[in-house]
Image (cartoon, helix red, strand yellow):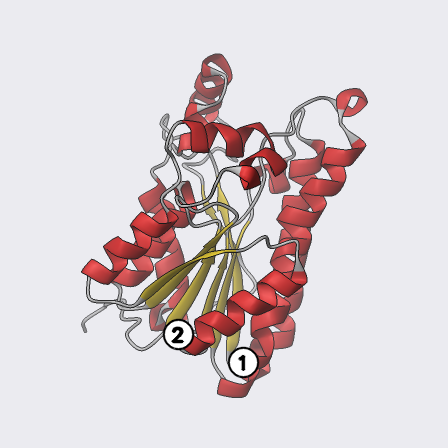
Amino acid sequence: MALEIDLSGRVALVTGGSRGLGRADALTLARAGADVAIADIQLESDSGEQAERYGPLAQAARAQGFVYAEQTADQIRALGRRSLALRCDVTERAEVAETVRRVGEDLGPVGILVNNAATLDHLGQLSDQSPELWERDLRVNLTGAFNCAQAVWPGLVEHGWGRIVNMASVAGTLGGFGQASYSTTKAGVLGLTRTLALEGARNGITVNAIVPGVIGTEAFGFGNPEMNERMIRRTALRRAGDPQEVANAIAFLCSGLASYITGIELNVSGGIELFTF
């Protein structure tokens, strides 16, 4: 019995796809046969104004050249698939709706949604958490996923097939010291995942969450080296994961091989949640 991931004829929308996990997800779905739209608040051709709105991580990414949305779309087209790179702020419902409309017009109806867009630059214990950044993180990490899911949902129901994969985090399952806003939003993503899985099941829609641990993205490189090393030592496999390892799991959940899997939180974490000594 041959086991293969074949997403030919499917159209995927990946948010936060300009770098890191989102970029790996987009390329992997394309290699599996899907046409892929990449949505991100930053494109290479932008003036840089968006980076100023979204904090130090986005600014650092632009300053160091870690914005690859249009380049990734070119790579996908070189694979023989169709692709778009679209500027989209997932907190703005009108922009999300326009993005879904553009994808439908240029590539076809969205069948696969990967909710990857997120912020991860608000660090501080409770007394130092900023109310403004708390609200921003809720809007981006949780409401953004809701906005995108709601925008594609009617099309998924109409076609009787759909795959939504939400990017959670071990911070949402274990908590994160100094990450009250981030861990809270990622725990919320898990609740959203289970609810959408229940509501979509009778319409051929599966909804699952990936729970990454320490992954060696550009954001990891911006982190505190001592803290990074502590997290790796806590991980059973004693290394950071590769973005490709997360993307492989996403491709599986979007494929026919995972047709009877819905509402799960799949740890791609190297065992960081295990008791390690």
Q: Quadrant of residue 128?
A: top right
State the image coordinates of residue 101 (x, y, percent, origin top left): 52, 73
State the image coordinates of residue 221 (x, y, percent, origin top left): 41, 24
Q: Against 46, is 178 above or below?
A: above
Q: Against 72, is 34 above or below?
A: below
Tag 2 residue: 106
Tag 1 residue: 155
Of residue 20 and residue 169, the one placed in the foreground of this image is 20
Circle 1: is it few (<14), some (14-19), or many (20+) Cα within 10 Å? some
Residue 98 got which mark? none
Q: Residue at x 36, y 30 (%)?
A: 237
Q: Residue at x 48, y 37 (%)?
A: 213
- Residue 133 at least partly seen: yes
User: Mark 2 to mark 1: distance in Å?
Assistant: 15 Å
Q: Nearer the viewer, mark 2 or mark 1?
A: 2
Q: Against 19, is 73 above or below?
A: below
Q: Residue at x 18, y 71 (%)?
A: 2
Task: Point out the image quarter for the N terminus.
Answer: bottom left
Left or right relative to 244: residue 236:
right
The residue most toward the top is 226
